[in-house]
């Protein structure tokens, strides 16, 4: 028989492996704790939505809608569907569908996989995870600033340094229309310098041309009319309001007049958190206001603002900053030898778990049950604070040997404890301290992360 062909993951779609899971958990737990502390509530929306939800929300002439969406026809009923490329459109749909803002504004958050058919490279994937926050029904600059400060708190709590905040205001539709007329006139004057993409966008989405990465166009783009100079009184007041709060809260930022974002729903405040540590895909978090969006879906005019973070990028940044978290699989590893010992170990493991500790029981592999020595090696690698050892001698004496796994090999102590006292003994040692620096907080797993 020929060897079956291997099947591998789809290009640009990653497995998150167990060795990275503690970092992801740390990031997710920290973020969720912070979001909660600012009053944000969780919302979960489907991964698949109607295609027109995204094309209408994000804009027909955007990279995402033009060339990056995983869209398909449901062969069962002909529905036009898309794997969500982002979360804001779905949140807005859900807010309208369930009338979530009928009794006032809402602070919402979500996390989950997003899909974009981009060219995969470091920090850019076809399936990636976002953490997002959307504040719906708030109009003032205070909520914009609050979202930004929430991010800063997260970077601080995760020990992330070397990120900077870029801020801009892209005004409202009329202000952009006036700017657009002047911008198109300016770009037409320099048509010989425009690349094919820019020529195509000249009349459909000229603002995006300012965002070009093409070095040949930089100088021309630098001299283009700046949207910031077209802002009216109200937009300026809002922008100044955001900046004033950030100044008072000592949040550093740079105003980047060329920051325009790649999705069409934005108005007024836009921002990005950027790092130089990740190569070309350095934006770890991005967002802004999208006051007109809800009305375009038939809802009553409702201002809104939000952001989304790229989780893979932040995990990579955390890795770049320090040693990865050491995963502790368990508190206790059960080692046993012989049939009766195995039975005892099973029963005892359940009782230890009843007491709230995490227990890994040694189980047989195709190589067999494993010698005492090989089992102790596994116990060592598990990160357990204690090994509970049951062999023939222990069975004969109705005791278990409890070995401390922390400290240098010579200092590890072993004591014999009667079966009925094992649970209390372990609880006493692990939870009540017993001289061990054990962080027994189950919400945070057993992660000791040192940035
Ligand atoms: P976005 O700028 O398209 O905005 O994406 C937000 C973040 O998701 C990016 O800054 C980046 O960290 C991450 N990201 C985007 N594409 C990829 C990719 N292909 N691979 C890895 N990470 C990626 C939005 O999605 C808006 N919904 C944000 C928002 C929420 N605005 C208002 N509310």
Image (tube, rainbow, N blue to C red):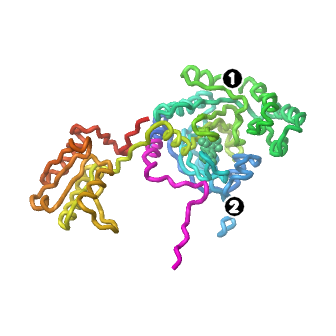
Tag shown at residue 346: none
Report the residue marked by disc 1.
237
Q: Is residue 448 left or right of residue 3?
A: left
Determine whether the beta carbon of the residue marked 1 sits less than 8 angstroms from the nearest atom of ligand 1.
no
**Foreground pick, 83 / 63:** 63
N-term mark: 1 or 2 = 2
Q: Please report contact status of discs 1 and 2: CB closer than 8 Å, yes or no.
A: no
- Does label 2 point to a residue whose CB lies under 8 Å from ligand 1? no
Callout 2 secondary element: strand
Q: Is residue 354 left or right of residue 246?
A: left
Left/right of residue 213 with respect to residue 332 in the rendered view: right
Q: With respect to residue 195, does 376 lie above or below?
A: below
**Location of residue 169 in the rendering, given as x and y in whole percent from the top left corner:** 70, 30
Q: Position of residue 216 (x, y in %)?
A: 80, 36
Q: How many marks?
A: 2
- Residue beneath the point at 78% across and 29% down: 222
Examine the structure image and report whether residue 100 is included in the region drawn in magenta.
no
Tell me the residue that label 2 is attached to.
80
Distance in Å between CA atoms under marks 1 and 2: 42 Å
Nearer to us in this view, 74 or 31: 31
Q: Is residue 86 visible?
A: no
């Amino acid at each position: 028989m020929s060897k079956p062909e291997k099947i591998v993951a789809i290009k640009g779609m990653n497995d998150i492996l167990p060795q990275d899971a503690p970092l992801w958990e740390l990031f997710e737990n920290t973020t969720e704790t912070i979001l909660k502390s600012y009053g944000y509530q969780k919302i979960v929306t489907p991964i698949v939505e109607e295609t027109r939800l995204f094309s209408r929300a994000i804009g027909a002439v955007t990279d995402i809608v033009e060339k990056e969406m995983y869209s398909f026809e449901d062969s069962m009923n002909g529905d036009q569907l898309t794997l969500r490329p982002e979360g804001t459109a779905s949140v807005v749909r859900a807010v309208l569908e369930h009338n979530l803002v009928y009794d006032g504004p809402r602070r919402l958050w979500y996390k989950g996989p997003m899909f974009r058919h981009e060219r995969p490279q470091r920090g850019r994937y076809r399936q990636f995870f976002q953490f997002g926050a959307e504040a719906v029904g708030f109009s003032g600059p205070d909520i914009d600033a609050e979202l930004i400060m929430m991010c800063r708190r997260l970077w601080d709590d995760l020990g992330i340094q070397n990120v900077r905040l870029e801020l801009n205001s892209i005004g409202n539709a009329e202000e952009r229309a006036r700017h657009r007329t002047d911008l198109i006139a300016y770009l037409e004057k320099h048509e010989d310098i425009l690349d094919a993409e820019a020529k195509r966008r000249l009349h459909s989405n000229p603002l995006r041309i300012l965002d070009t990465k093409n070095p040949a166009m930089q100088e021309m783009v630098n001299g283009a009319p700046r949207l910031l100079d077209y802002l009216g009184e109200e937009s300026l007041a809002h922008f100044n309001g955001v900046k004033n709060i950030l100044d008072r809260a000592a949040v550093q930022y740079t105003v980047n007049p060329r920051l325009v974002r790649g999705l069409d729903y934005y108005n007024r405040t836009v921002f990005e958190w950027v790092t130089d540590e990740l190569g070309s895909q350095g934006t770890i978090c991005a967002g802004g206001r999208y006051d007109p969006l809800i009305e375009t879906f038939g809802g009553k005019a409702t201002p809104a603002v939000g952001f989304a973070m790229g989780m893979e990028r932040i995990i990579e940044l955390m890795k770049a900053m320090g040693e990865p978290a050491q995963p502790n699989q368990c508190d206790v590893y059960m080692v046993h030898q012989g049939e009766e010992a195995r039975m005892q170990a099973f029963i005892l493991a359940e009782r230890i778990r009843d007491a709230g500790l995490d227990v890994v029981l040694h189980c047989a592999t195709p190589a067999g049950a494993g010698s005492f020595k090989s089992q102790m090696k596994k116990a060592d690698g598990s990160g357990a604070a204690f090994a509970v050892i049951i062999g023939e001698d222990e069975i004969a004496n109705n005791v278990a040997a409890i070995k401390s796994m922390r400290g240098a090999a010579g200092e590890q102590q072993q004591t014999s404890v009667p079966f009925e006292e094992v649970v209390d003994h372990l609880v006493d040692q692990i939870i009540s301290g017993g001289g061990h620096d054990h962080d027994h907080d189950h919400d945070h797993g057993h992660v000791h992360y040192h940035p």
